[in-house]
Image: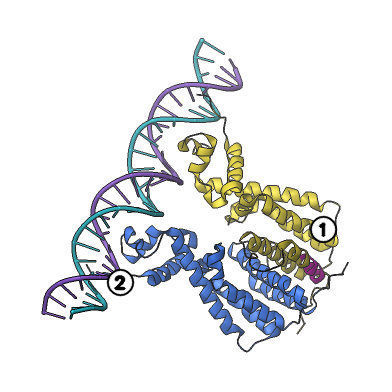
Chain colours: A blue, B yellow, C cyan, D purple
Amino acid sequence: MARAGLNRGRLIQAGAELADEVGFDQVTVSALARRCGVTVATLYSHVRNSHDLRVGIALLALGELADEAADALAGRAGKEALTAFANVYRDYAHRRPGRWAAAQMRLDPQTAAGSAGVRHSAMMRAILRGYHLPEPEQTHAVRLLGSVFQGFVGLEMGGGFDHSAPAPPESWERVLDAVDALLRNWPTTDAT
Amino acid sequence: MARAGLNRGRLIQAGAELADEVGFDQVTVSALARRCGVTVATLYSHVRNSHDLRVGIALLALGELADEAADALAGRAGKEALTAFANVYRDYAHRRPGRWAAAQMRLDPQTAAGSAGVRHSAMMRAILRGYHLPEPEQTHAVRLLGSVFQGFVGLEMGGGFDHSAPAPPESWERVLDAVDALLRNWPTTDAT
DNA sequence: GCCTTTGCCTAAAGCCTTTAGGAAAATTAC
DNA sequence: GTAATTTTCCTAAAGGCTTTAGGCAAAGGC
């Protein structure tokens, strides 16, 4: 019967590749079975259901992203760290669009807590240490960073920048400059 | 036969309500037909297909959002304008989660050009006029604004802030303070 | 009252999901 | 080396959602 030797890991890997090729929302149990040269029912012995498959891809993506970010962060601090980290996100989104979309999936609290998502916020906090923000402001700053990265890449990928002139990379650079400047000069609470 | 008197407009309106109730990706032609007490095939005389329906909801949402934003902007400038505008976005997302998700849909260039999306960027530019940025930087600033708003609300809605302490509204306020400060003190290109 | 438009329906084909139950290959155990 | 077990895969089948084709009936204009 010449079996392909599939298992959960291989399947999710293949699912991630499929996502990058055709888009995350086109990742269906049927399409994946077709791609693996196997009947649909087969996949259900490796994966609980469609949602489980998608969550698997999301966790894979979050892990890869955290690994790359950790690598990029090694030995860097300040603006250099900020830029390196941000570029990992953006580059990953361009290089693996389907996986990146998967990483945006809403996960239930349990799953999220066990995901590489926690590593991500830890790294953002590490970057912020180089900017010496007062503690109560750190969380706000982490959220700002996440918002800017997520927001910019999301808009860029979604074609939100396709109608105005400057190419995204130029804006990206200026946005990172701006965020760096902001972190170095974080406004105090009593500002009018 | 006691007909309900449906037409495209009413259908898209109902679709928007359905989206807010069960989530935008649960908006299916079948579900909408069920909700309207009509057979599935009926909807296909009002709407080209599933995608067309979703695009319709997206355009409705973009229009509503632009209207509300324009209202909020009237008679305001500077930080007041920035805050009012930003709050319209965030409030809308909370009040109409399904529509907000619809508004994030990727539209093909044609459709996007004819949508209220252009009003949105015009309003952002109007806000920036109060900050007197040099022209080449304006577009970058518009993109930063969009990124922050989109990013923050997206993360908040996606549960990305559920695991750390301060409630989102507090961070939102601080983030808006920070963005205001940044716009008032936009870094020059030659900064190291 | 007739006619056109508009709203709606039945029927049917195609694809995706998911479960149930069973065969064959690969692995392990004696 | 063979027997038992586990793993991988399959056929079959039921239920949903999408979309097209063709036709009936209500509403409204003339």
Which of the image's four quarters has the N terminus of chain A?
A: bottom left
Q: Position of residue B105 (x, y in %)?
A: 58, 55
**Residue D16 sits above or below residue B45 on the image:** below
Q: Residue at x 63, y 77 (%)?
A: A122
**Residue A171 sits above or below residue B30 on the image:** below
Label 1 CA crowd tier, 10 Å (few <14, some 14–19, many 20+)? many
**Residue B30 sits above or below residue B87 on the image:** above
> In this figure, which residue is indicated by the disc labeled 2?
A5
Which amino acid, by three-letter code, is at mark 2?
Answer: Gly
Subunit under mark 2 = A
Q: Position of residue A34 (x, y in %)?
A: 34, 61
Per the rendered image, the range of residues in magenta is B176-183
Residue B41 in view, yes or no: yes
Which amino acid, by three-letter code, is at mark 1?
Answer: Ala
Q: Quadrant of residue A157?
A: bottom right
Residue A163 in view, yes or no: no
Q: Position of residue B170 (x, y in %)?
A: 76, 64
Which label lies toward us, 1 or 2? 2
> In this figure, which residue is indicated by the disc labeled 1?
B81
Q: Quadrant of residue B144?
A: bottom right
For label 1, the SS is helix
How far apart are the two marked residues, 1 and 2, measured between alpha carbons?
60 Å
Subunit under mark 1 = B
